[in-house]
Amino acid sequence: MLHTSETSAASFREPTPSMAAFFGGVEQLSGREREVLELVASDCSNQEIAETLYVSINSVKTYIRTAYQKIGAKSRSQAVVWAITHGLLKIPGVTVIIDEPVGSAAA
């Protein structure tokens, strides 16, 4: 079925607060939250993160929880995507291009 651009545009919804947070920057994170997310994105377990940063496992869980809230992530995989798209994890040979989120005004 063919839709006009007017119909298609009307079907998009405005970003939710969690979507807006997902597109927020690294500056919203504390230094420790950023370190923890870098390690999460590098596929470290919570125990490995605790040992690397010399903190308790409970501290790691707290940093992860608060970081997830700030970036709008609901899962570890969403946090990894966020970390990659925001430059916390560099993957050799991969360039990440982020389009404007749906509902943002064009310049």
Image (cartoon, rainbow, N blue to C red):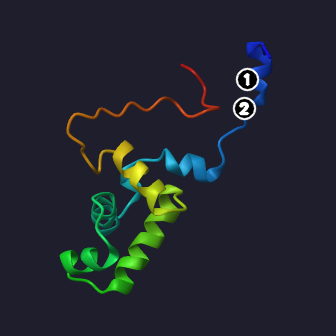
- Mark 2 neighbour density, 10 Å: few (under 14) some (14–19) many (20 or more): few
Q: Picture coordinates of residue 92 (x, y %)?
A: 20, 39
Q: Mark 2 points at which residue?
A: 12
Residue 60 vertical position relative to residue 35 in the rendered view, above or below: below
At 25% from the left and 76% from the top, the residue drawn is 48
For the N terminus, which image quadrant? Answer: top right
Q: In this view, does 56 lie to the left or right of 3?
A: left
Q: Which residue lies under the disc numbered 1?
A: 9
Name the foreground residue: 85 vs 16: 85
Q: Is residue 32 above or below residue 84?
A: below
**Above-or-below relation of 44 to 4:** below
Residue 63 is marked as none
Q: Is 79 left, or right, of 53 in this rendering?
A: right
Residue at x 30%, y 45% (from the top left corner): 87
Q: Where is residue 86 in the image (x, y as percent from the top left)?
A: 36, 45
- The picture places residue 54, in percent across and down from the top left corner, at 20, 82
Element type at marker 1? helix
Tell me the crowding category of disc 1: few under 14, some 14 to 19, or many 20 or more residues within 10 angstroms, Cα based: few
- Residue 40 picture location, percent across and down: 33, 63
Q: What residue type is labelled 2?
A: Phe
Q: Is residue 59 above or below residue 15?
A: below
Asked whether disc 1 touches disc 2, contact meaning CB atoms under 8 Å apart, the reply is yes
Q: For the residues marked 1 and 2, what is the alpha-carbon distance in whole angstroms?
A: 6 Å
| Residue 41: quarter of image | bottom left
